[in-house]
Image (cartoon, helix red, strand yellow):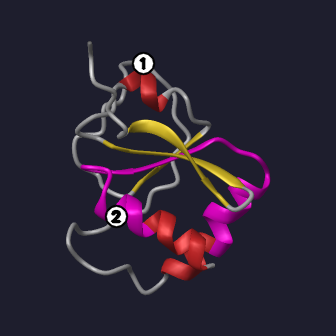
């Protein structure tokens, strides 16, 4: 039996929002196709499908570092409005733990 990998864009519920979260080391191009907007928190090894169109809200962050100085503005001015509209968002970093967890925890904090 194949073990389920929770880092392939599974849904996470945070308050009224539902976000897809994952890590590029586990994501496939089909996982990216589940979302209307991609929020890459990394620019490393994104599994873009050949010839596919994506709407991207880029927020590349350095691994093992803190959030950028404009983090709250990015969340409140760009990411949260998408979620409020009901847009399906996939947020991801490389492994789906640190930066993705920071994104999700920041939404909880706000």
Judge the density around disc 2: few (<14), some (14-19), many (≥20) Cα neighbours within 10 Å: many
Q: Is residue 60 visible?
A: no
Magenta stretch contains residue 96: yes
| Structural distance between the alpha carbons of marks 2 and 1 | 28 Å
| Chain-order first, disc 2 or disc 1 | 1
| Residue found at the very far top of the displayed protein | 1
Q: Is residue 98 visible?
A: yes
| Labels 2 and 1 touching (C-beta < 8 A) | no
Q: Position of residue 80 (x, y in %)?
A: 67, 64
Q: Residue at x 20, y 72 (%)?
A: 64
Magenta stretch contains residue 15: no
| Residue found at the very far bottom of the displayed protein | 69
Check residue 51 in the rendering and tell me which mark sits there, or answer none.
1
Q: Residue at x 45, y 56 (%)?
A: 58
* Position of residue 93 in the picture relative to residue 58 (left or right): left
Disc 2 is placed on an element classified as helix
Q: Residue at x 46, y 31 (%)?
A: 32
To which residue does mark 2 refer?
99
* Position of residue 47 in the picture relative to residue 45 (left or right): right
* Position of residue 110 in the picture relative to residue 29 (left or right): right
Looking at the rendering, the stretch of residues picked out in magenta corresponds to: 76-102
Quarter of the image with the N terminus in it: top left
Q: Is residue 55 above or below residue 74?
A: above
Q: Residue at x 31, y 31 (%)?
A: 47
Judge the density around disc 1: few (<14), some (14-19), many (≥20) Cα neighbours within 10 Å: few
């Amino acid at each position: 039996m194949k073990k389920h990998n929770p880092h392939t864009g599974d849904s996470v519920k945070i308050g009224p929002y539902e976000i897809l979260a994952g890590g590029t080391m586990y994501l496939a191009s089909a996982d990216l196709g589940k979302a209307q907007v991609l929020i890459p928190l990394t620019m490393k090894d994104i599994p873009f499908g050949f010839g596919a169109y994506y709407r991207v809200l880029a927020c590349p962050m350095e691994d093992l570092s803190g959030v950028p100085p404009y983090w709250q503005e990015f969340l409140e001015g760009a990411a949260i409005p998408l979620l409020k509209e009901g847009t399906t968002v996939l947020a991801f970093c490389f492994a789906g733990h640190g930066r993705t967890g920071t994104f999700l925890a920041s939404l909880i904090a706000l």
